Image: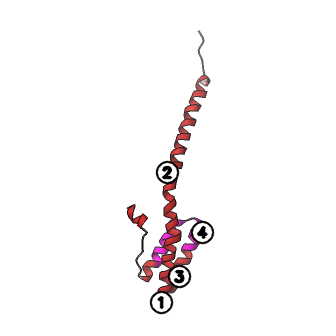
């Protein structure tokens, strides 16, 4: 009777299980990614327009400060950092005293 010292014989089936698990996990991640697509469009399209309009309507130092926040937010959008850009745009709106107008799709998702 011979004893097998390594489990090399079971390697192909173990590899198949690990590969199948990795593919399933990758598919799960890929299927949840589109949920974020609508959010970035609003933050770097709709919100920036609101902040620009509010900054243009402000007067004096509030206008200068709000425009600076909007310009910083635009640069962050170009860099792909929508979350930080949205903070800049919302700060510009707050400085000018204008409330953020949310689209219907965002309000319905809350």
Q: CA distance from mark 1 to mark 3?
A: 11 Å
Magenta stretch in the rendered image:
73-92
Who is closer to the viewer here, 6 or 30?
30
Q: Which residue is mark 3?
A: 67
Lateral position of residue 13 relative to residue 54, left or right: right
Q: Nearer the viewer, mark 2 or mark 1?
A: 2
Q: CA distance from mark 4 to mark 1?
A: 27 Å
Task: Please determine whether, in this image, residue 52 is positioned above or below residue 25.
Answer: below
SS category of the residue bearing label 2 = helix
Mark 3 or 2, nearer chain start: 2
- Numbered label attached to residue 32: 2
Q: Give the class, few, some or many, for how many residues have Cα within 10 Å of label 4's Cα (few <14, many ≥20).
A: few
Q: CA distance from mark 3 to mark 4?
A: 17 Å
Lateral position of residue 86 relative to residue 78, left or right: left
- The location of residue 8, given as percent across then percent down, is 62, 24
Verify CB contact (< 8 Å) between mark 3 and mark 2.
no
SS category of the residue bearing label 3 = helix
Residue 95 lies in magenta, yes or no? Answer: no
Q: Which residue is mark 4?
A: 78
Q: CA distance from mark 3 to mark 2?
A: 35 Å
SS category of the residue bearing label 1 = loop
């Amino acid at each position: 009777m011979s004893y097998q010292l390594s489990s090399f014989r079971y390697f192909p089936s173990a590899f198949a299980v690990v590969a199948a698990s990795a593919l399933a996990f990758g598919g799960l991640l890929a299927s949840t990614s589109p949920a974020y697509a609508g959010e970035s469009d609003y933050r770097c399209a709709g919100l920036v327009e609101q902040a620009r309009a509010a900054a243009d309507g402000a007067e004096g130092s509030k206008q200068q400060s709000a425009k600076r926040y909007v310009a910083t937010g635009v640069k962050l959008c170009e860099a792909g950092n929508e979350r930080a850009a949205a903070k800049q745009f919302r700060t510009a709106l707050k400085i000018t005293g204008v409330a953020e107008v949310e689209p219907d799709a965002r309000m319905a998702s809350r």
